[in-house]
Image (cartoon, helix red, strand yellow):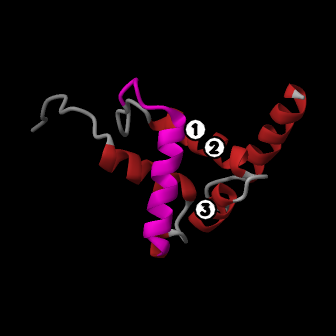
Amino acid sequence: QMKKYVAALILFSASAHAGFFDGNKLYKYMQDNTNSFFAMGYVSGVHDAGDKAVFCTPDSVRVGQIFDLIKLHLEMNPADRHEAADIIIMRVLKQHYPCPNRGTRS
């Protein structure tokens, strides 16, 4: 069972290159019970790639909350759905979880 999940996730990740996986497809997957775990994995992967570098989520935030936040953004902003899914996720998370100011540079 776990091997099937990992294999499916690898195949999905390989086909989910940013240029080919947009907000429309992500939103469709988020709404589909069969594919929602793929969407959860994608959102989680983008989160992990940007956390503490682009945005700073508190340790208490769970992946389900992030999933819901991104899904709500896509529901409320259909005009953004044509953009690359990873860009949408990064932008939304940066807006909601900005990193503390680490000093200024001149």
Task: Please identify the quarter of the rendering in which residue 77 is found.
Answer: bottom left
Residue 77 in the magenta stretch? The answer is yes
Q: Please, what is the three-letter code of the amino acid marked with disc 3? A: Tyr
Q: Which residues lie in the magenta part?
A: 58-78
- First along the sequence among labels 2 and 3: 3
Name the residue: 42% across, 31% down: 61
Say what secondary structure mark 2 lies in.
helix
Name the residue: 77% across, 47% down: 12
In 3D space, how far apart are the residues under numbered discs 2 and 1 (Cα atoms)? 6 Å
Residue 5 in the image: state x and y as whole percent: 83, 34
- Pick whichever, 33 or 26, lies toward us: 33
Q: Using the image, tell me which numbered label, if any, was put on residue 40.
A: 2
Q: Using the image, tell me which numbered label, if any, was put on residue 66.
A: none
**Residue on which the image places disc 3:** 27
Task: Please identify the quarter of the rendering in which residue 40 is found.
Answer: top right
Residue 9 in the image: state x and y as whole percent: 77, 39
Say what secondary structure mark 1 lies in.
helix
Location of the C terminus (image quadrant): top left
**Residue on which the image places disc 1:** 44
